[in-house]
Image (tube, rainbow, N blue to C red):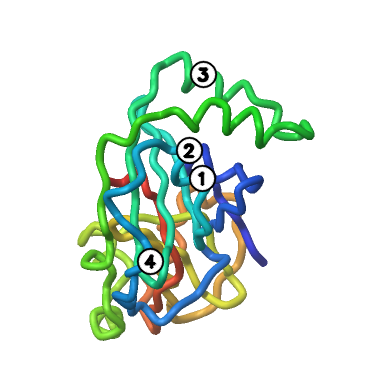
Amino acid sequence: MMKKMITVFMAVLMLFAVTACGGASGDGEATTDSTDFDFEAPETVGDLLALDLDNMQQGTNDNAFYYGFEKDGSYYRFKAEMTQEQHDALFDIDYAADDAAEQEAAILSDLVITDRQKLDDQLLSQEDLDALVGKTGQELLDAGWIPGYGYDLEAGEFWLFYGPFCYTIGFDGEFEESDEIVNDEDYFKDRTVTSATFNSLGDVTNW
């Protein structure tokens, strides 16, 4: 059984093909062939929205807008300041409307980029992930891992954030859905990690 828990407002914006954690997979190794993308060139969010990108994630936090994506095998995220009025306008969009994408673009396109990061050096290698096998869920939580968008109890897999990325973490034993469990970590904190793989970009607001 699959449970998706959306924890970042902009994850609802499937109009721009945002890929929620749990819907992608990878080998944890980013390439460095990004010669076609000038990291310093984009000046506004509209410049980013015009690009051909993969694995897009976006979110808001403290009146700032964040946009992360994969381009030519490398990962990036950009930050733009926004006013309270612009922030509220995003929440007022009817995303069932035919012109929802246009409404959103009208709000976001002119936002000026104030910070940018290339994220490849924050991506854990498969060797790093393999080193998690045998640790308990509580040890991961103590080390800064955060429950992500949800889990697949049948597979015993949970999607956890570490830095700006999301990883699929497998735990031993069998799991059953319980209405008494409110926090995802209560499912796995006493279990042992059996596998760990890169999944996708995670919470790009975790700057």
Tag 2 near tag 4, CB within 8 Å: no
Q: Within 10 Å of the Cα at label 2, are there few (<14), some (14-19), or many (20+) other Cα atoms?
A: some
Instruction: Examine the rendered structure and indicate whether residue 78 appears above or below residue 160.
Output: above
The tag on residue 46 is 2
Q: Which residue is mark 3?
A: 88
Residue at image coords 54%, 45%: 11
Left or right of residue 66: residue 119: left
Secondary element under disc 4, as helix, strand or loop, is loop
Residue to which mark 4 is pinned: 36
Q: Circle 1 sits on which residue?
A: 49
Q: Nearer the viewer, residue 38 or 188?
A: 38
Q: Secondary structure at mark 2?
A: helix
Mark 4 or 1, nearer chain start: 4
* Quarter of the figure with residue 165: bottom left
Callout 4–callout 3 Cβ contact below 8 Å: no
* Dot placed on the residue nearer the N-terminal end, 3 or 1: 1
* SS state under label 1: helix
Q: Position of residue 40 (x, y in %)?
A: 27, 50
Marks 2/1 in contact by CB < 8 Å: the verdict is yes
